[in-house]
Image (cartoon, rainbow, N blue to C red):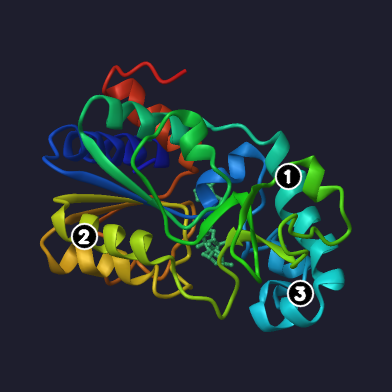
Amino acid sequence: MSSGIKHTEIITEAAEKIIHAKHLVAFTGAGISVESGIPSFRGEDGLWNRYNPKTLEIEYFIQHPELCWPVIKEIFYTHFNKARPNAAHRLLAHLEEKGILKATITQNIDSLHQQAGSKTVHCFHGNSARLTCLKCGTFYPANNEFLSQAVPHCMQCNGILKPDFIFFGEAIPGEAYQLSFEAARQCDVLLIIGTTGEVYPAALIPQEAKAHGAFIIEINPQQSNFSFQTTLLQIPMKAGEAAQAIASYLKLKID
Ligand code: APR
């Protein structure tokens, strides 16, 4: 069977599941933002092939903020300011507006779901839009006033600021953790988009949804850790392309 026909059949099945879902939840990773110009972490063009993940280890950051901050700016702030939501972010926002999608759980810190108009977004790994003081916990916007400093410092106590997303070795934000697993338990359809499923505890979310009876759909051009034992319907396409195909089948305007 040609891949074109095969994809059409898969898109049709996925679109029907999505539009008839009683409680659809989305679970997204870096892959959903690749077509927005933000590189993923793993895979041939992955950030971890070019940068040392040590830069994002909390202990290393506390000891060497002057070594970490230039890399953090390059990875997370240079790309993000140029990135815009793509069709996949817009499809999720549209499905939420129609009352079908109840929540988006994202591992991403790029705010593209929020920019696309999604309202219920659980930021499982925090978000890059804010900085926080390691000493007194004060929050600041991640804007040029702070990012222009070699190592951003707190205006209250002069402590060192870090982006408000979790570094390796840090705990998942409590509220996001709780709301994400709650959403996973409540959903009857879970739409996984663009994640290897390499990082825990985020990778437990699809398993939690499946254990509670959800139908698992996955959009990813490659196989992931979910492909064999969790996913029931794999769409082997890029997120933006699959989203356009689903939207046109459902006659949804997401442009
Ligand atoms: N559309 C859909 N999926 C894509 C696309 C695309 N255009 N391009 C790549 N992918 C897929 C890849 O096949 C891969 O499975 O996206 C996934 C990206 O995987 P990772 O880079 O590992 O990203 P993610 O799974 O989100 O990483 C989890 O690791 O470093 C930490 O905190 C970081 O949140 C991140 C976590």
Q: Give the residue type at disc 1.
A: His
Q: Give the residue type at disc 3.
A: Asn
Q: Earlier in the sequence, mark 3 or mark 2?
A: 3
Residue 52's disc number: 3
Q: Residues within 10 Å of mark 2 (few under 14, many from 20)?
A: some
Quarter of the picture containing the N terminus is top left
Residue drawn at x 35%, y 39% is 7
Residue under circle 1? 79
Q: Give the residue type at disc 2.
A: Glu
Side of 29 relative to 15 (left or right): right
SS assignment at label 2: helix
Q: Earlier in the sequence, mark 1 or mark 3?
A: 3
Residue under circle 2? 182
Residue drawn at x 38%, y 70% is 203
Side of 157 relative to 251 (left or right): right
Give the quarter of the image for residue 165.
bottom right
Where does residue 67 sit, x and y in percent of width and height?
86, 72
